[in-house]
Image (cartoon, rainbow, N blue to C red):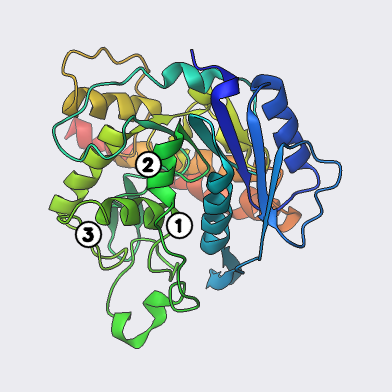
């Protein structure tokens, strides 16, 4: 297995006084000989933190986007710049890009690095497949305006990534910072108001995960092009799946041992309560379909949102997870108790009854 002495860990992002020390300590515990590169902002206080190399950059700032009367901060440029600057200092064979509030509970993810070697003949960009998290590696999203599950191509999680250092450089180094506020306000502009984003009330041109992934493959393959998040076709979706299956290995918490402390659901065995996310079973299924027909799937099949009762059940899970999440404020917890969970349970019950009658008919 890979030795930790061959790994550079880029811990990127804003310093959190509670979670960043936990993050760094977990790296020292489970990757004891790894090089820790802390990439953050000039104004952040790093006193008392355990790292080997410090990178401080000018904060590129954020853009604000109102969604459902709440403010969402698009930190795309912050994540991209801190990752790029951290990778510049990495000098070991392998690199782990890690949010500064993620925590390791082991080095189990290393066991999966060589487990899915087969590839198709197309879109073999990375020299070796890169490990990524199920949150938020999407294949579709529920879009109320379009009244359907809409495919979302090139949407690979940006929580953490592990692979050959050269492959992570390929993924991030040549991606441009976006121009704000035009990027985040994209779907509010007059020329784009007739377009329907699959991300509902979100107005950004692309979410960060999709922007990083799409940008990488678009600059390396001439047949891959998207104008924006609303620019979706069956052909593009198929290309996306082949790009992902050939260049990534998607792991859940059970496989990786990496979680986000403020999101309790990141430890869930079945993360599909967030609709349209990959899980390990789905990754194995697509690996078998595209790359190796003889591969034996090891993960149990979870409940998917392919039918209405399954979808409604996942909504119940989602609202319960929000209730239990440490990051949910008191007002949010009350909203889940009195509105979110009761409505989801009612919808689940109605869909079960409808499904029962449908099968009888």
User: In terms of depth relative to the viewer, which is nearer, 139 or 113?
Assistant: 113
Q: Which residue is mark 2?
A: 311
Rendered residue at 31%/35% (across/down): 247
Q: CA distance from mark 1 to mark 3?
A: 17 Å
**Image disc number at residue 208:** 1
Q: Above or below — where is 316 with respect to 76? A: above
| Neighbourhood count class around disc 2 (C-alpha, 10 Å): few under 14, some 14–19, many 20 upward | many
Q: Above or below — where is 179 with respect to 105? A: below
Which of the marked residues, 1 or 3, is nearer the chain's N terminus? 1
| Neighbourhood count class around disc 1 (C-alpha, 10 Å): few under 14, some 14–19, many 20 upward | many
Q: Which residue is mark 3?
A: 232
Q: Quadrant of residue 128?
A: top left
| Neighbourhood count class around disc 3 (C-alpha, 10 Å): few under 14, some 14–19, many 20 upward | some
Q: Quadrant of residue 202?
A: bottom left
Rendered residue at 35%/42% (across/down): 351
Query: Going by the image, does 134 lie left or right of 14?
Result: left
Which of the marked residues, 3 or 2, is nearer the chain's N terminus? 3
Q: Above or below — where is 326 with respect to 27? A: below
């Amino acid at each position: 297995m890979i030795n930790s002495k061959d790994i550079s860990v880029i811990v990127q992002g804003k310093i959190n006084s509670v979670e960043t020390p936990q993050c760094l300590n977990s790296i020292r515990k489970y990757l004891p000989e790894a090089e820790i590169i802390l990439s953050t902002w000039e104004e952040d206080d790093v006193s008392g933190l355990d790292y080997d190399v410090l990178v401080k950059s000018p904060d590129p700032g954020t853009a604000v986007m109102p969604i459902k009367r709440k403010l969402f901060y698009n930190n795309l440029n912050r994540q991209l710049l801190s990752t790029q600057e951290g990778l510049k200092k990495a000098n070991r064979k392998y690199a782990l890009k890690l949010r500064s509030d993620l925590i390791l509970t082991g080095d189990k993810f290393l066991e999966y690095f060589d487990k899915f070697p087969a590839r198709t003949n197309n879109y073999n960009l990375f020299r070796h497949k890169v490990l990524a998290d199920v949150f938020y590696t999407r294949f579709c999203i529920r879009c109320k305006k379009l009244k359907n599950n809409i495919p979302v191509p090139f949407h690979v999680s940006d929580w953490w990534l592990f692979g050959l250092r050269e492959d992570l450089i390929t993924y991030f180094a040549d991606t441009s910072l976006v121009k704000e506020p035009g990027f985040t306000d994209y779907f509010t502009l007059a020329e784009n108001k007739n377009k329907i984003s699959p991300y509902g009330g979100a107005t950004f041109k692309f979410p960060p995960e999709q922007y990083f992934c799409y940008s990488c493959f678009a600059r390396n393959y001439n047949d891959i092009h998207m104008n924006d998040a609303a620019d979706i076709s069956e052909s593009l979706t198929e290309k996306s799946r082949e790009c992902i299956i050939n260049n990534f290995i998607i792991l859940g918490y059970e496989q990786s041992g990496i979680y986000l402390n403020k999101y309790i659901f990141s430890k869930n065995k079945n993360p599909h309560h967030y609709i349209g996310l990959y899980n390990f079973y789905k990754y194995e299924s697509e690996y078998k379909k595209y790359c190796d027909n003889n591969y034996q799937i090891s993960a149990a099949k979870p409940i998917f949102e392919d039918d209405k009762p399954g979808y409604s059940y996942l909504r119940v899970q989602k609202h319960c997870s929000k209730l239990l999440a440490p990051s949910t404020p008191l007002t949010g917890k009350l909203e889940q108790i009195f509105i979110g969970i009761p409505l989801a349970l009612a919808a689940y019950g109605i869909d079960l009854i409808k499904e029962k009658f449908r099968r009888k008919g």
